[in-house]
Image (spheres, rainbow, N blue to C red):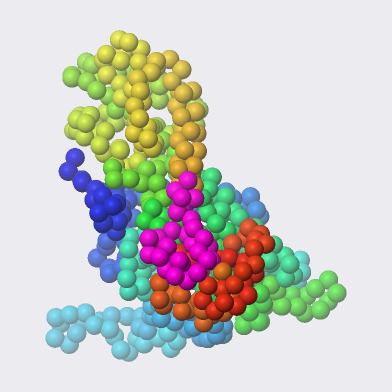
Amino acid sequence: MSKKITSREVDYSTWYNDIVQHADLAENSGVRGCMVIKPYGYAIWEKMQAELDKKFKATGHQNAYFPLFIPKSYFSKEASHVDGFAKECAVVTHYRLKTSDDGKEIVVDESAKLEEELIVRPTSETIIWDTYRKWIQSYRDLPLLINQWANVVRWEMRTRLFLRTAEFLWQEGHTAHATKDEAIEETEKMINVYADFAQDFMAMPVIIGLKSESERFAGALETYCIEALMQDGKALQAGTSHFLGQNFAKAFDVKYASKEGKQEYVWATSWGVSTRLMGALIMTHSDDKGLVLPPKLAPFQVVIVPIYRNEDQLKEINKSVDSLKSLLEEKGVSVKYDSRDTHKPGWKFAEYELKGVPIRLAVGMRDLENGTIEIARRDTLEKETVSIKGVENKIVMLLEEIQENLYSKAKSFRASNTFEANSYEEFKQIIKKGGFVYAHWDGTNATELKIKNETKATIRCIPQEPSEENGVCMISGDHSERRVLFAKAY
């Protein structure tokens, strides 16, 4: 193969782009800042989507769909929300084009100006809460637990495939509750759903915590997040869950009749993850040979490559592989048999290594004679030749081992790149190198902004894990109840 991957050590950004493009995950489109997700990349997203959807439904949520276009007036109803998204909004002003008078170009038909401009959704709180006003009348209608799988548009100036694009895919949950406690419980429940998915399926360790006030979602009273550490020492926010209080209920006049017959405003949450998880998956596990996929999210977990000289040999190998493929599929293993005669085995080995397939099996005529098969692991690049008899059981165990190994490796990397800083000078030296840094902060926006401006590091979260350690802020010297998590971030 000629698809060479740039070394992570030489140029991390180019390494990432090489993997996204050479592993056939996505490519840039004809629209600036937008991407085409290719079939192999979309297959991984479908796996993520399917597992998350199961988890949402298991916790009582239902899927629905809301409009792509939002009347501009809806945004003005929740002031902090519009402030948070105004600079990223794409606006529809006209509904028709026409041919220019000289017939040489297509122009906007000025007679087709919309009475009210429409926002292409950057998020759906406003259109959904306008709808909830009609759906919620009584305490019997609560809780209302809705999720939407959709695309959104945020007009980003600096884009990178999967990590930050003008249009991206995501899910957004929007729930309504009778009480504050129920809404907070929902917010916490969903961030834990995300954390479980990240760790159990993506094999990506995460830290759960609260965002500082300046980092909260626009319109939220609290934002919970999961933060992961990428191999270049930068943090990536992998999911968020927001306690919205009654802000949107009051803005859109969403009330319910309580059991006592009183009119009460409902309490709200929203939560979401996006195709940014694809970027997280790539940067957590991949290496200089290409993509590395956890078995639970691989489009196919095993690829079988035949090694043969002629059609007669291929027919013999096919019989053996058909039997093995059936045995594996009976055990729930997804398998691809690549018997194409358009590419040689060496090309295929390199291709599937680049695409991160967890296990590669190779079988030739000598293997048939000896009753053996070669197994190659993508995570460790180890190979061994084993008996083909009962190999399906070995592969099932090996897939579990690979999943666990990827998580352990990522967790070990995070541990070795997590530090404590007790002074600002120490903090600045550590943050230059990258990694997670726990340090004391006095809780003020001014101090947080100073750190961000001088080091480009931000407070990723106030960790959920309890901490009894009091101290003093590394900037102001004022009292600090606990350390918070800093890092440079995507």
Could you tell me how many numbered marks the image carries?
Answer: 0
In the image, residue 128 lies in the stretch drawn in magenta: no
Decide: is 383 above or below 110.
Answer: above
Question: What's the magenta region?
Answer: 412-439
- Describe residue 138's horizontal placement relative to residue 161 as left or right: right
- Describe residue 392's horizontal placement relative to residue 108 as left or right: right
Residue 130's quadrant in the figure? bottom right
Task: Name the image quarter holding the N terminus.
Answer: top left
Residue 467's quadrant in the figure? bottom right
Q: Picture coordinates of residue 171 (x, y %)?
A: 50, 60
Q: Residue at x 57, y 77 (%)?
A: 477
Q: Residue furthest right?
A: 260
Q: Nearer the viewer, residue 230 or 278?
A: 230
Decide: is 294 above or below 244.
Answer: above
Q: Picture coordinates of residue 273 (x, y %)?
A: 50, 60
Q: Residue furthest top?
A: 369
Q: Nearer the viewer, residue 164 or 167?
A: 164
Q: Residue at x 39, y 15 (%)?
A: 387
Q: Would residue 299 be visible to someone looking at this image?
A: yes
Q: Would residue 75 be visible to someone looking at this image?
A: no
Q: Picture coordinates of residue 277 (x, y %)?
A: 44, 55
